[in-house]
Amino acid sequence: MWTEEIDFRSVSEIRTRSTVYLGVDAILKIDDILNSLKTDGISKIAVVTGKQSYKKCGAWDHCVSAMDKHDIDYVQYSEVTANPTVDHVDAATNAARKFGAQAVLAIGGGSPIDAAKSVAILISHKDKTARDLYGYQFTPQRAVPIVTINTTHGTGTETNRFAVVSIPEKAHKPYIATDVIYPRFSIDDPRLMVNLPVDQTAYVSIDALNHVVEACTSMVANPYSVLLAKQTVDLVARYLPIAMKTPGDLEARYFLTYAAMTAGVSFDNGLLHYTHALEHPLSGIDPSLPHGLGLALLLPSVVKKIYSARAKTLAFVLNAIVPGLKGDVSESEVVFDGLNQWLSRFGVVKGLSNNGFDSSQIEKLVKLVYETPGLEPLLGLAPNDADRDSVAEIYAEAM
């Protein structure tokens, strides 16, 4: 395979709308990044992290050393949790505004990075709150510079214009998409990911897989999103089993990280539809549900629903996971069973009913899909008619 000729220990500079440093020890690039910010007159940074992982992964010492070296002061908010809320964002924003932060540095997976992107907007819109932002009460016009140090191989948020934050009192989990939150610089260092728990290793890569399945089948899919989808699936199929078995395998982590990054670019271009629109209400109701697990529970039913509309594309993209697909519309049950079998290899117990939900919640879940800001428009990107009955059918089958 072509990956055998790639030196995963060499740090590459990959340019999308963001500049991403990918490779083992890419964390060392934080020195050059902060030097660049200081040259631009930035001397105060807001750092947004989770509670512990930013230190455990090994990134923090490098950041502190580089900030000290370049005389950059910082204020830190370290209370971000999985499925971050508007309250997390407002607390971090208040600290950043009071400090006079001129840029934001995020260290973590999708949750700290998405929270940090939101903070970057709100620093520049001083009369707005996170509820205003995620309630679509205004359109962001600007944001302070964003730097991300990514510590999971899943979301792709380190290289795209999306962020997701929950509004807990409504069980809403909206997203925003705006060009002002493309990170200026991002670091994807597989060495920072070797301590990911085994289940999270699976869930984050399943998140990347879902990104591309949707991006390559949406109504705005294009050759770029399809080819990135194919590459992402091939890499996840090959390297996820290795990372699950040998967490410290840096080559496996490297290519899973690259796969997640390309998946982020794929859905930046092809966008998303069913699976994310239906998962957000799940983790909106139960914030303890890992996003990737929620997606895994829905994926086979979603692919079954859309297979007749995008059979040839899905057969091409999913071949490494479900071999032998020919792109015939009659294969929907085959791909449904194949995806369930593949997911079970990584500890995914089939069925929403086996993961804290029951059929009595379907009506509420459907209602949340249509009430949560931004989710209904995603359904309009599905390759077949996505009405309330279709949404209810997917939830029912996934139960």
Image: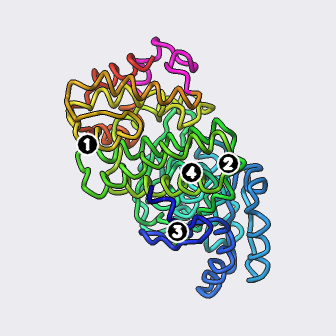
Does residue 226 appear to the left or right of 48 in the view shown? left
Q: Point out the stretch of residues depicted in magenta.
A: 348-367
> How far is disc 2 from disc 3 in space, using C-alphas?
23 Å
Please name the residue shown 21% across and 30% down the image.
308
How many C-alpha atoms fall within 10 Å of the one at disc 1: few (<14), some, or many (≥20)? Answer: some
Please name the residue shown 56% across and 38% down the image.
203
The residue beneath circle 4 is 153
> Can you tell which of label 1 and label 3 is closer to the viewer?
1
Location of residue 356 with respect to 118 vertically, above or below = above
Assign a secondary structure to mark 1: helix
Most distant residue in the top direction: 360
Please name the residue shown 56% across and 51% down the image.
153
Assign a secondary structure to mark 2: loop
Point out the tag, 4 or 3, that comes first from the N-terminus: 3
Name the kind of residue labelled 4 in the image.
Answer: His
Point out the tag, 4 or 2, that comes first from the N-terminus: 2
Please name the residue shown 44% across and 66% down the image.
180
Point out the tag, 2 or 3, that comes first from the N-terminus: 3
Q: Position of residue 240 (x, y in %)?
A: 55, 43
Point out the tag, 1 or 2, that comes first from the N-terminus: 2
Quarter of the view holding residue 327? top left
Instruction: Please check the rendered image and state whether residue 354 is part of the magenta-colored stretch, yes or no.
Output: yes
| Numbered mark located on residue 313 in the image | 1
Instruction: Please check the rendered image and state whether residue 313 is part of the magenta-colored stretch, yes or no.
Output: no
> Can you tell which of label 1 and label 2 is closer to the viewer?
1
The residue beneath circle 2 is 80
Name the kind of residue labelled 3 in the image.
Answer: Val
How many C-alpha atoms fall within 10 Å of the one at disc 4: few (<14), some, or many (≥20)? Answer: many
The residue beneath circle 3 is 20
